[in-house]
Amino acid sequence: MNKIVIISDLHGNLKAWKEAKKYFAGANLIINAGDILYHGARNPLTDGYNTESLVTELNNSNLSLMMVKGNVDALVDDWVLPYPLPEYALIDREGVRIIVYHGYQHEYNVERIDFAKRFGADILIFGHTHIPYLEKEEDVILLNPGSLALPKQQPPQATLAVIKGETIKIITLNEGKELYSLSL
């Protein structure tokens, strides 16, 4: 498969977006699994929080972006971003079917797997938990890239995912260190 970069839970952090851009080189698609602009009432403002400049960056980007609505993304975000944010998106790349949503819709993997199977998906991409996750269950790959701005795993590390060829990897934002890997 061509290179796809997956991010989630940016929460308005321009600094994290700019740092992630180093991984975008050669990517055919950048997927953002929601919570793009607002930090959320239960989250602190992060170093690098700048929604106005992030909107400008996203709107002026020549990247192939696909974004879905997160639980803190608002109607006004649809007005300022390059296109309306859907609740979920279905992507077919080189015979691999991918379904993307933010993840607040389901709490348990059994629900996520059932949802993915309804679409005949090989991969379900979600965010929301801010914790990276990569497992294959019942012939469905569950992929949560973690959060670029507000990581919640211990120890906290900003993470993203890259699909390239037949491999999916979750890597750290700062060093690009591989944390998890799985073959398609």
Image: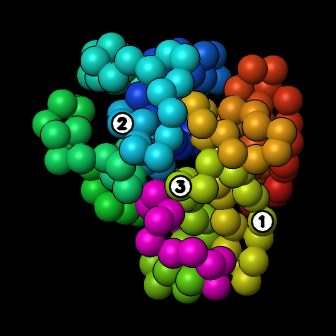
| Residue assigned mark 1 | 135
Residue 61 is at least partly visible in this image: no
Q: Quadrant of residue 109?
A: bottom right
Residue 114 is at least partly visible in this image: yes
Check contact, mark 1 vs mark 3: CB within 8 A: no
The segment highlighted magenta reads 94-110
At label 1, which amino acid type do we have?
A: Glu
Q: Nearer the viewer, residue 172 or 156?
A: 156
Check contact, mark 3 vs mark 2: CB within 8 A: no
**Earlier-in-chain disc, 2 versus 1:** 2
Q: Which mark is residue 128?
A: 3
Q: Is residue 9 left or right of residue 152?
A: left
| Spatial separation of the CA atoms under disc 3 and disc 2 | 13 Å
- Residue 104 forms part of the magenta stretch: yes
The mark lying in front, picked from 2 and 1, is 2
| Residue assigned mark 2 | 38
